[in-house]
Image (cartoon, grey):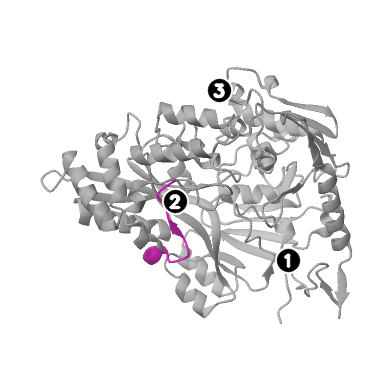
Amino acid sequence: MTFKATLLAGTATALIALAGMAVADGHATHPVTGDVLASDQSFTYRVLDDFPSIDPQLIQDVSGSEVARDLFEGLMNEDAEGNVIPGVATGYEVSEDGLVYTFTLREDAKWSDGVQVTAQQFVDGIKRAADPATASEYAWFLGVTGIVNAEAVTAGEMPVDALGVRAIDDLTLEITIDAPRPYFPQTTTFPTLFPARLDVIEANGDDWTDPANIVSNGAYVLEEYVPQERLVRVRNEMYWNNDATIIDQVTALIINDENAALTRYLAGELDMTDIPAGQFPRLSEEYPDQAISFPNSCSYYYMFNLSDSGLEALQDVRVRQALSMAVDRDIIVDNVLAGGQRAAYTFTHWAIPGWEVPDIPMANMTQAERNEQAKALIAEAGYGEDNPLEVEIVYNTSDSHRAIAVAISQMWKQTLGVEATLANQEWATYLDTRGEQNYEIARGGWCADYAEPSTYLDLFTTTSSYNDGKYSNAEVDALMQEAKLSEDPLPLYQRVEEIAAADAAIIPIYHYASVRMMSANLENWPTENLLQNWYSRDLYISASE
């Protein structure tokens, strides 16, 4: 089985088109669309929080991954529709049993210091992520890929050399997985599997990602990073496809206040920013060519601390069910957010390819029916007017997160008499709070790493390092293990969602939409890529009319 011929043909076509960039009236034009290009090809966008890390093997958040996809390049990339296309690898071949992937690397792939990108560097990156000494928050992702012995290595039960990865020669990488997994090629687009320059890392230690030290192999290099303010990357002249890159400079401005970010966007300081909760209807009327909303494979939820340090009341499934039922999700999506989001009663995003949402009883009730059942459950658990339940909701600083927390706390108060206090924390502190189970109820958001339900449902397994609620159900663990080897895992995934809903493992609240203000001159944004894995090298700024 081979994928190489198709990939190479598509790449050649794109390169030929981009190489023919025309000039009209002294202005360059886009070789495919014919749009006249602006003379200033700079893209500035807003992020909510600072980056915990931009080290590919240590990245654990969406914003960090966006930066990593610019600075580094993996074996494969994604196109505007989310299809897997060549990256450092020109293509791959798969063994007949679907277990062995052989990637051929391009000869002209270089690091920003001119050193050739090799298969061994991909081996080094994957081993580095798996090594318990690295303490990668995303080491668990290697188990999801199915790389042979990944789970045993990340658990410290086997040496890193036992991983099913090897460099056959400088330009040939072999990866062996434990079972046929159709989504495996897409996992190679994720930063955890990016190559690593161990010489640079060892020479500079934790400071290797500083602008003065970093060496990268992507379309951009890191020019400047001011914590809590901005991160700037500029074109990498050594990138193998630099001639096809149009955007010269990309700046991420760290702005915690969504309304302040909107003001700066309207003042022309940003090319893109998120729309604050509830403002999409107004902005879409005032700026119909700039306000946009489209599906994004992320789910918003509240998690319970079910560890030994958690609130005793929340260990009672009746309390958790009552809290979940009393959340009027339609009010959240229609009135608080009003940006095209969908109410959620399961964790897996509705738009994941091949996913069919199972029949969850609560989803078929009216809100009035949910409220009545919630009242009965909370009373049965021993809480009410004479003994009100008191809980704390922790969320990371954001006007939208606060608006949702306020709304939910009022719903709980009105329906159940629950007294909820709110606590906002800056991003890094919030991550620590969740990871250390130092909370009662916490806001969560999960974005798919690949387009398959397990990217969500693995978080329900006992051993998942991102199971910050410490939910544990032996049947769920067994079902997810069985799904890895199943030719048709859909019924297994649906059963996991049914169990999680019955256990009230989390409170699913809504499925995301990307709700943004985007400059009318910012072109080629991949709105059809459900995972929103975008690359600055694919974008361009058209000239104003």
Q: CA distance from mark 2 to mark 3?
A: 29 Å
Query: What is the number of the mark on residue 540?
Result: 1
Question: Relative to 293, is 358 above or below?
Answer: above
Q: Secondary structure at mark 1?
A: strand
> Residue tagged by mark 2?
300
Q: Residue at x 61, y 44 (%)?
A: 450
Residue 290 visible in this rendered orientation of the protein: yes
Question: Relative to 103, is 372 above or below?
Answer: below
Camera-side residue of 205 and 133: 133
The image quarter in which residue 544 lies: bottom right
Sequence-wise, the earlier of marks 2 and 1 is 2
The quadrant the N terminus occupies is top right
- Horizontal and vertical percent position of residue 108: 88, 45
- Whether the residues at callouts 2 and 1 have beta carbons within 8 Å, the answer is no
The region drawn magenta spans 334-346
Q: Residue at x 34, y 37 (%)?
A: 503
Q: Is residue 176 magenta?
A: no
Q: CA distance from mark 1 to mark 3?
A: 44 Å
Q: Secondary structure at mark 2?
A: strand
The amino acid pointed to by label 1 is Tyr
The amino acid pointed to by label 3 is Ala
Sequence-wise, the earlier of marks 2 and 3 is 3
The quadrant the C terminus occupies is bottom right
> Residue tagged by mark 3?
155
